[in-house]
Structure formats: C-alpha cells, structure tokens
Image (tube, rainbow, N blue to C red):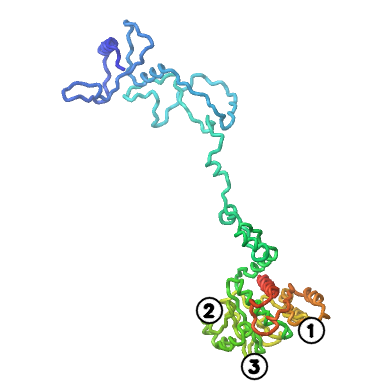
C-alpha cells in the first residue's frame, strides 16, 4: 500500500540531506531517460501501518534494509494460533533430564560454508538479526506430533505372512471329496447329480491306495524274478497277471522276459496260442544274435510281442537250444532292457540251478516265490527260500513275496491257514490268489475275465513288488 503524501514528502526531504550509498544493481532506464522504480532492480521499503495515526510532527523512520522491514512486519502480525493435537502421540514423551544452568547469552557460532544467515539482505545491505531469532533444529529423536493409531492396509499386508501358492493350494481352493464308484454311495451320487457326495467307501479307498503304490514313480530300472522249485503251481500265470496289472496302473510300460529253459509259454499265456502262432516268432535267441544292432526302442520292438501295454520277450521253443541261455547272455539282455524299461519281470522256469539262474539272481532286485496249497508245493517253496539264504542271497530271501495260487479245489484235509502261517514267517509278505478258472485252464490270461478277488490279489502282488524297489 502506498505511503501517505505528507509522510513521503518528509522522507524525501530527509533522504536528500543524507548522502545516498551507491546502488549495487544497475538501474533500468526507459528510452526517454526517466527513472522508474517499477523497472529498477530495487524494492521500495515497506513500513507497517501503525494502529493509531502518528502525530504530524513525529518523523516516520524509513526502513532502508529488507531484513528490518521483514522483522517489523513480523512484529506487527498477530501470532498464529496453533491448535493442540487431538490424537495421542505414538509414544509417551521422554522426561527431560536436569541439566546445569546455561548462560542466557551464548557466543555466536560460525556459520557453515555456503550458508546464509537470516540477516543477510538481498540488495547487499547487512543488518543484525533480531535478538528474538532462534534457529530451528530438527532432532532425529524427536517424536512426531501425530501418528495413525489404526493400521493402514499397507501395514496389514506387510505384517501378514505371505501364502505359499505351490505347497498349499488348499488355502485358495476348496477341497472336493473323491467321487464314489459303485455301491450305495455311487448310486446316491448318480441320483442327485453329484449334489450329495458321501465320499468313497473303505473298500474303494483301499483300491485307490493300491493303485497309488503300483503307480509310484521310480528312479532307475528294476527287475523281479518269479521262480519256483516245482512246476505247475502258477508261476507263469502269476507273471502274466502281475505284468498286465502293472501295465494297467503304471505310466511306463513294463517288460516281461521268458527265461524258462524248458520251452516256456509266457507269450502264449499273454496273447493266446492262436495269435502267437500267427505272429512272427521272434525269440530271445534272435535278440541275442542281433543285440549289437539294437540301439533304440524302435529296433528293440522288432523282437518283442505286445499284450496291450505289456511288452514281452518270448523264450526259445526249440528244445535243442532252449537250455543254452547262459548267465552272461541273460545279463546282456538285462542291460539292454534297463535302458528303456523301469520295471521288468523275469519268468525263471522251474529250478534254481540252470545256466542262466546265477545271472538272473545277480540282477534281481526282489523275488516272487510261487507256491501252492498242496503239501508238496508248500514244502518246495520253503526249500527255495532256504536254498537262497544258504547260497549268498539272504537279502532276496528275506524280502521275497510268496504267492500261493489255489489252482485246484484242494481237499478239505489240507489246512490252508497252517500252510500260510508256515510260509509267512520266512518272507516279507504272503499273498493268496483264489481259485479262478481263468487262471487254472492254462490258456490265455485276461484281466477282464478274472474274478474281482483274483484281480485284487494281483494288485496286492504288484504293489508289494514296487514297494520292494528302493
């Protein structure tokens, strides 16, 4: 606001009587030579308006320094009202410790290099700072005046543990009961369209557990030998039934090798006599003659037969050369098979003393001992386990699985429980296969025509075999 006319006239008269200091800033003049305060680099002095009109005889001092004008303006303004905090501080204030009395007047500290004091004027004039000026210092330990007591969304997310989407998918997806198959629970599920799911029965849970054990993923290749000291007690039928069961539940196809020196019929029992005769009669002897040229699964398939997903190598049918398979030749076949199959079954035939038997036992990971409910069959199974334990195969005998096949309707005079108890104490597990005409006929073995009890027995044998692969 411009000053009153009488005050400006008096101030101009006093300034004219005093010598003026040279200006540090170059005046900007107009083209006609007139000096204009609005275009100069200086700022006119501002004096606060007094609350009362001064007397006309009292001279009005002129503020020649920007600092003096700013200080006078600050003194004229009323103190701003600072509202008190309405929320509790984040932590209680610290009680100050008593300190020795300090003198009221302190020596001025030297200013840091490049700093600017409040008394420094923009136009070059220097003036002392007011005595009431106190520099402000922000202490790092000072407690903030305000803080949110209620945590924000960012604080909640930061404090909460991070969920594991990989190992704990059940945290985000509601677990569903398995669908019941068959029986009363399956009927209720089908009638309600899945609205009522009572879950699987105990029998179905047992079946699912057997399937899980059979389909367990394996690291490497394993071999199971099926042998007995007596013929005609279900050795080959067990090999075919277990092989077909492994092919049904496992993701990788198993392989079955006929190493019977007495013209084995493994392939005939898996394919049927008619189909085998129509096929190209490739045997284990043919594979040995050309084993050096077999360098892929495609080349190996030329010497194999397929019963669904079960791959088979036929035994030699010529009696003159059937007993010529040696232990070294079998080990060559086994090494070739291990490159392409994770599970292999070997039908060893009758006896444990033929030429290839030492190579079979050397490469076997576990054994299946075939037995029967006849007294002679039980005794021969026990003799087989004792022979293995006394000839350096104690671990194989201890971990063997004994399979008792009820091929014929045995006499009621035979105590089946006594035979099972007699053999169960000298092996890892004993499994009984019930009497089934699909097995006893000595012809084609197909899982579709077997009784449910027989199929379950083969599942238990397959699960026990895979459990033994360590």
Q: Secondary structure at mark 3?
A: loop
Q: Earlier in the sequence, mark 3 or mark 2?
A: 2
Q: In the rendered image, which residue does mark 1 sit on?
A: 376
Circle 2 SS class = helix
Say the numbered circle drawn on residue 297.
2
Q: CA distance from mark 3 to mark 1?
A: 27 Å
Query: Within 10 Å of the Cα at label 2, are there few (<14), some (14-19), or many (20+) other Cα atoms?
Result: few
Give how far across and how far down residue 258 sits, in percent. Answer: 63, 84
Image quadrant holding the N terminus, namely top left
Front residue (pair 206, 360): 206
Residue 230, compared with residue 7, is above or below; it is: below
Mark 1 Cα shell of 10 Å, populated few (<14), some (14-19), many (≥20) = few
Dot placed on the residue nearer the N-terminal end, 1 or 2: 2
Kindly report the distance in space between the C-alpha atoms of the residues bearing marks 1 and 2. Answer: 43 Å
25 with respect to 82 (left or right): left
Please provide percent x and percent y for residue 162.
56, 49
194 or 350, nearer to the observer: 194
Residue closest to the eye, 79 or 241: 241
* Residue in view at x 60 percent, y 87 percent: 274
SS of the residue at dot 1? helix
* Quadrant, the C terminus: bottom right
Q: For the residues marked 3 and 2, what is the alpha-carbon distance in whole angstroms?
A: 29 Å
Task: Please tell me the numbered disc located at residue 319.
Answer: 3
Foreground disc of the pair 3, 1: 1
């Amino acid at each position: 606001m411009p000053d009153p006319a009488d005050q400006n006239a008096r101030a101009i008269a006093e300034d004219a009587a005093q010598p003026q200091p040279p200006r540090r800033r170059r005046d900007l003049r107009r083209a006609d030579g007139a000096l204009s305060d609005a275009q100069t680099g200086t700022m006119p002095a501002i004096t606060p308006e007094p609350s009362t009109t001064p007397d006309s005889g009292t001279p009005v001092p002129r503020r020649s320094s920007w600092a003096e004008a700013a200080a006078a303006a600050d003194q004229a303004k009323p103190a701003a009202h600072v509202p008190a905090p309405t929320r509790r501080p984040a932590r209680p204030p610290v009680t100050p410790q008593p300190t020795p009395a300090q003198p009221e007047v302190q020596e001025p500290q030297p200013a840091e290099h490049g700093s600017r004091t409040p008394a420094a004027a923009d136009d070059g004039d220097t003036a002392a700072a007011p005595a009431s000026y106190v520099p402000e210092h922000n202490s790092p330990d000072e407690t903030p005046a305000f803080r949110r007591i209620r945590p924000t969304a960012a604080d909640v997310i930061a404090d909460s543990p991070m969920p594991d989407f990989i190992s704990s998918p059940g945290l985000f997806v509601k677990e569903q009961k398995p669908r019941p198959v068959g029986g009363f629970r399956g009927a209720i599920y089908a009638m309600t369209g899945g609205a009522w799911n009572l879950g699987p029965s105990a029998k179905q849970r047992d079946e699912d557990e057997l399937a899980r054990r059979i389909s367990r993923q394996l690291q490497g290749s394993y071999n199971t030998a099926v042998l007995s000291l007596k013929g005609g007690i279900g050795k080959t039928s067990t090999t075919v039934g277990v092989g077909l069961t492994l092919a049904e539940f496992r993701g990788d196809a198993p392989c079955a090798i006929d190493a019977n020196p007495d013209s084995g019929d493994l392939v005939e029992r898996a394919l049927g006599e008619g189909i085998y005769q129509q096929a190209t009669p490739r045997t284990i002897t043919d594979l040995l003659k050309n084993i050096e040229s077999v360098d892929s699964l495609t080349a190996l398939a030329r010497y194999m037969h397929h019963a669904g997903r079960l791959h088979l190598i036929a035994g030699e049918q010529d009696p003159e050369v059937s007993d010529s398979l040696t232990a070294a030749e079998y080990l060559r076949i086994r090494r070739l098979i291990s490159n392409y199959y994770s599970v292999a079954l070997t039908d060893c035939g009758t006896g444990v003393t033929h030429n290839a038997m030492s190579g079979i036992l050397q490469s076997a990971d576990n054994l299946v001992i075939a037995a029967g409910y006849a007294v002679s069959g039980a005794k021969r199974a026990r003799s087989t386990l004792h022979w293995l334990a006394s000839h350096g195969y104690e671990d194989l005998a201890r971990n063997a699985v004994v399979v008792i096949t009820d091929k014929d309707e045995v006499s009621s005079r035979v105590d089946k429980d006594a035979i099972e108890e007699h053999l169960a104490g000298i092996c890892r597990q004993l499994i009984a296969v019930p009497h089934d005409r699909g097995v006893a006929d000595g012809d084609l073995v197909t899982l579709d025509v077997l009784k449910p009890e027989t199929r379950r027995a083969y599942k238990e044998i397959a699960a026990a075999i895979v459990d033994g692969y360590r």
